[in-house]
Image (cartoon, rainbow, N blue to C red):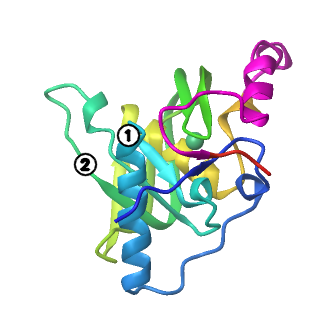
Amino acid sequence: MAILPIVTYNDDVLREKAKPVTEFNEETKELIDNMFETMYNSDGVGLAAPQIGVSLRIFVIDADNMLEEEDEKPGPLAFINPEIVEKSGRKIPLDEGCLSIPEVTDKVIRPEGVKVTFKDQNFEDREIDADGWVSRVIQHEYDHLEGILFIDYLSLFRKRMHKNDLKEIEEGKREVKYPVRPKL
Ligand SMILES: [Zn+2]
C-alpha cells in the first residue's frame, strides 16, 4: 500500500467528469487500498480518486468516528460507479472541508438523505440508504466525480472570505500535514 499525494483545489483533474470503472481487477483493488491509506493518513473521512489525480468514478469513506454511539456504522466503504438514485429529507447546512482545500471549511446546504447504488471494495453490488454525516460525506465525494467542489456552492461573499487561503494553497505556500501536490 502507498500514501499518495493529494492534488489541490485548482488542479484541472478536479474539474473533469470522472470516467466509469470498467476493469475490476487487482489493479483496481490496489488503487482502492491506496486511497484508504491516503485518506487515513490525512485524517480524512472521504477521498475521491480525482483527488489523487485519477479520473475514475471511485471514492472511499469512513465516517464512523463522526457518528454517535447508537448510530449504525457503515465502516470503511468504497463506492465504485456510484449512482445517487434518491435524495430525501430537508435541506440542511453542515460544515464541510476538503483534503484538496486544506484548512478551509464552510457551511454547505444539501438534502439530509441519499440512496446510492454502487459496487463496494469486493466488487459486490450494494445499495445504501444514508443520512446524517454518512450522507453528507457521500454527497461531497460524489460531487468530486462530477468535477464539483464544495466551495462552488458558496456565496460570492463567502468565497471572498477564503480568497487568501485559496491563493496560499494555489501557490503551494500552505503547510499541510499530509503529502499534497500543488498544480505545477
Ligand atoms: Zn473533497
Whole-percent x, y for residue 106 in the image = 61, 19
Assign a secondary structure to mark 2.
Answer: loop
Residue identifier under label 1: 134
Q: Amino acid at mark 1?
A: Val
Whole-percent x, y for residue 114 in the image = 46, 46
Q: Is residue 150 above or below residue 55?
A: above
Assign a secondary structure to mark 1.
Answer: helix
Q: How many marks?
A: 2
Residue identifier under label 2: 74
**Number of other residues with Cα within 10 Å of mark 2, as a class: few under 14, some 14 to 19, many 20 or more:** few
Residue depicted at 71% across the width and 29% down the height? 173
Judge by depth and name the residue closer to the eye, 71 or 32.
32
**Number of other residues with Cα within 10 Å of mark 1, as a class: few under 14, some 14 to 19, many 20 or more:** many
Q: Badges 1 and 2: C-beta atoms under 8 Å apart?
A: yes
Image quadrant for the N terminus? bottom left
User: From the Cβ of disc 1, is ligand 1 less than 8 Å away?
Assistant: no
Whole-percent x, y for residue 76 in the image = 28, 52
Q: Is residue 179 left or right of residue 117?
A: right
Q: Is residue 55 left or right of residue 2?
A: right
Q: Is residue 151 above or below residue 141?
A: above
| Magenta segment includes 160 | yes
Answer with the quarter of the image where residue 72 lies. Answer: top left
Residue 118 in view, yes or no: no
Q: Amino acid at mark 2?
A: Pro
Residue depicted at 55% across the width and 29% down the height? 97
Q: Quadrant of ligand 1?
A: top right
User: From the Cβ of disc 2, is ligand 1 less than 8 Å away?
Assistant: no
* Residue farthest left in this picture: 70
* Magenta stretch in the rendered image: 154-180
Whole-percent x, y for residue 150 in the image = 66, 35
